[in-house]
Amino acid sequence: MAQSTKLLSTAAHSIPSAPRYRAIFDDLKYRIGKGEYAIDKQLPSERRLMEEYHASRVTVRHALQQLQEEKLVHSQKGKGHFVSCPTAVQNLGQLLGLGESLSQTGMVVTSKVLALEEAPASPEVAEALNIEMNDRVTCLQRLRYINAQPASFNTSYFPVDIGRYLSEYDLERQDLFVLIEDRLGIELSTADLVMKIGKSDKSLAARLGIEKGETVVEIERLTFDTKGSPVDFGILKGRSDTFQFHVRVPRW
């Protein structure tokens, strides 16, 4: 509770003109984003929040309403408010990494690196990266989290002249596209996407916190630099209740 009061004080100090409920909203949003409250976990009762933040019931309810409007929580009549499964809405009209896409939403995106190693290119990877089969590539496997909740299992393949530098950087918090452009000086241009629906096997289900056989979103993405050379061939397998995609399609 002391930590929450401190966070609330910091938020209120940095935005002195913000309404009282906004500081409470910001603090609860921060705590959800850091995983203090997990998916489907109940938030403290209104009375507990009133005591914790030294606020009126009207102020607390306004903060909870704002959390609902941002789809961070949902209410159950007679029971209270519960943390919602985070939904990553990505605009397919622009080439952005997951962290970049969600940077304005307040959601916290992190990763756990499961593997970073060189390996011989499979026929699929060799064709994508325009190299010979069994040529060496760098393989990166990460479990990605949104608001500390498992969201997707990502496998990315890079030409070794790019991949050999990845171990020098923080791959758990750094967005790959930002890293490639800002740190490696490679300007990205376009990507080819293939999307389909699949089923989770036992290993994937355990990683994503779902049941074996549940539907997952599968995305293959081949990213090119401005010279038209392949930079990254990635395969994402994500929870179907976490990912949504938006694209505007012209009539002509």
Image: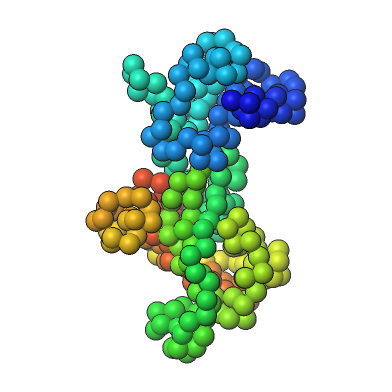
Q: Nearer the viewer, residue 176 or 188?
A: 176
Q: Residue at x 51, y 85 (%)?
A: 136
- Quadrant housing the N terminus: top right
Q: Position of residue 11 (x, y in %)?
A: 69, 28
Q: Position of residue 183 (x, y in %)?
A: 71, 66
Locate residue 84: give its quadrant: top left
Instruction: Determine if residue 244 is in view.
Output: no
Instruction: Determine if residue 241 is in view.
Output: yes
Q: Position of residue 217 (x, y in %)?
A: 36, 56
- Quadrant housing the C terminus: bottom left
Tell whether 25 sits left or right of 195.
right
Q: Position of residue 236 (x, y in %)?
A: 43, 61
Instruction: Tell how many labels.
Output: 0
**How is the protein colored in the picture?**
rainbow
Q: Is residue 202 above or below residue 30?
A: below
Locate residue 126: give its quadrant: bottom left
Q: Nearer the viewer, residue 51 or 40?
A: 51
Looking at the image, which residue sits at the far front? 2
Q: Is residue 98 above or below residue 222?
A: above
Q: Residue at x 59, y 52 (%)?
A: 100
Q: Residue at x 54, y 21 (%)?
A: 63
Q: Nearer the viewer, residue 129 or 192?
A: 129
Q: Residue at x 56, y 45 (%)?
A: 108
